[in-house]
Amino acid sequence: MTACIVSGAVVFSTLFPVPAAAAGKMAAYDGSEIVDLAGNREMKAYGERLVTGGKALVSRDYGEEAGAGISYYLDSEAGNDENEGTSEDKPWKSLEMVNNRTFQPGDRILLKAGSVWEEETLSPKGSGEEGNPIVIGAYGDGEKPKLTGNAAVPEVVSLYNQQYWELSDLEITNTAAGFTGAMNDQNGNKLKDVRGIRIAGQDGGDLYNYYLHDLYVHDVTGVCAWISGDNNGKPGILGKQGWDKSKRTGGILFEVLEPATDQPTVFHDITVERNVVNNNSFGGIIVKQWKGADTGGEHWASREEGKGNAADNYYCENWKPHTNVTIRDNYLSQENSDYACNTIYLTSVQGAVVEGNISKEAGTCGIEMYYADDVTVQRNEVYKTRVKAGGADSNAIDPDKASTNILIQYNYIHDTGDGILLCGFIFGTSVVRYNVVKDAQKRYINPHGDKGVNYVYNNILYNTIEKSNLPFIESSGGNGVYLNKSGNMHYINNNIFYNTAKTTTSVGIGEGASTSYDSNCYYGKGVQAPEQETRAVCGDPMFEGGLTGDGDDVGVELLKLRLKPESPLLNAGTQVEDDPLLSISANPGRDFAGASLFNGEPDMGIFEY
């Protein structure tokens, strides 16, 4: 595919509205508003309090509300299984009373605040219906009711072939005794095939409506099982497990099990929001589909058979993705376990939004999409991703194998290994726009795909780290290979490459047959425009403030990136047009802070003046 210049516009092939609080902003921005557009500030503060010893309190007392169906009450201290269980003063005691019952639409299972159950799985039966889900929640004041598996049960909460469920206000752990989080043989031998919450389907057809919110899911000590790779002799790390046996341990898991029939199981309408999910291995929030053998039998996860159908969005008949998935406003931290990897692993989905989340110290990847289509990743803060537990990567966001129409916008990424890995093996299409990537230890943008198209525009890539080599755009597989695949184009426009370091000796802004540069700004020691660049601005972008990299105030840091009225980058960008290979509108409608686009010609960077 060749870039076509039409009146200064790159021909390119508004999904989700900006939050109402941001609508209408123009010249003056408040730092507190901006930080909420790059990760939910309230959830970040709340999550940090919990993971440092704060109390997880009940957010909603369902006991004070009338339910549509029957309400059942449990109290681990004052309950009695001889009670009817249908009033606060006559609650049940054990989870067994719940597990032996089939619940009806509108029923509620309410656990007493402060109660604790150990080494049991909560696995009620039954399904709700549209507009009338079955609810698991809390009653009373105080700390969330706690279910702790002690790594003695495979999962602490389990649903199987059920639909229309709401789960809230539980604290869930599944921790092996004596586990400290450090990478060593003693801890590795403690890891097991365990999860916090598992929602599974098998020969279940279409399953609808799951709402998980205000949960505290932490310290699930699951094994780290990889698709390929090797365990390198380290216990608790399993290599070469293939798709279906890998990456299915951790905090919250949606998965499809091996079928006995040819009927696909597909989840629809999943919402996971306002949860604190930390120190769970392998991952925090995971969505998977059954893959089986790609060459025969039932296999619904993979899209690889559609690699020849680029004009039809790589359609393949066997692919059965989960739909309408929302992961929003969660605090996800993996900082206290060397085995806790991805915070969000989203696979085999079509139509998903990942927004407002905080991802801290993930291993391998913060937010990863695989065999996915039509996913928007926006307004997240992702930082301190690092290599862990036998994984090779350390990126913030990764549209991985056979993923298309992946929109990555308005995110704040900092202090990671790689910033954004464009890993479209087999095929992939993506748009990366209006993001800030700061102080990536490895590469800021890592092109590593085989076939497709990628647009990278109006981002700010800036470095404050004193180091000799600064790879802004570089492929970990080699520029000579991945930047020279003519069938996998990268159009790079309106970005700002900025370096404050004084000891830089080389800056990598890779180019080849599959890259095109137009209307970018280059500034700082060693930062030079590539030969392909058609309309470079080589000089000071004139931000409103200096970029020091100091401090943790996200709002203040981002405010520094506004352009002064005399900036040479105002009206110096190029308009990016729609591309028939993408279903994403080229014009997002709003800049990083919610101001309307455009005021004249596009500005470079993330703010429109």
Image: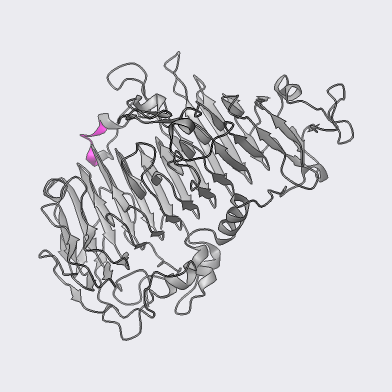
Of residues 8 and 158, the one nearer the viewer is 158
The quarter of the image holding the C terminus is bottom left
Of residues 33 and 20, the one nearer the viewer is 33
- Coloration of the structure image: one colour
Residue at the image point whose x is 87% and y is 25% from the top? 83
Q: Residue 166 lies in what quarter of the image? A: top right
Residue 127 location (% of width, % of height): 65, 27
Can you see residue 312?
Answer: yes
Residue furthest to the right in view is 89
Left or right of 447: which side holds 78?
right
Image: magenta residue range = 306-311
Query: Is 117 within the magenta?
Result: no
Residue furthest to the bottom in view is 566
Residue 38 location (% of width, % of height): 47, 61
Residue 207 location (% of width, % of height): 54, 29
Residue at the image point whose x is 37% and y is 25% from the top? 291
In the figure, 204 relative to 430: above or below? Answer: above
Q: Residue 106 lies in what quarter of the image? A: top right
In the figure, 156 relative to 484: above or below? Answer: above
Residue 533 location (% of width, % of height): 14, 66
Can you see residue 595?
Answer: no
Query: Is 310 within the magenta?
Result: yes
Of residues 310 and 217, the one nearer the viewer is 217
Residue at the image point whose x is 24% and y is 57% from the top? 12
Left or right of 406: which side holds 222?
right
Left or right of 70: which side holds 572?
left
Of residues 462 and 1, the one nearer the viewer is 462
Residue at the image point whose x is 18% and y is 51% from the top? 489
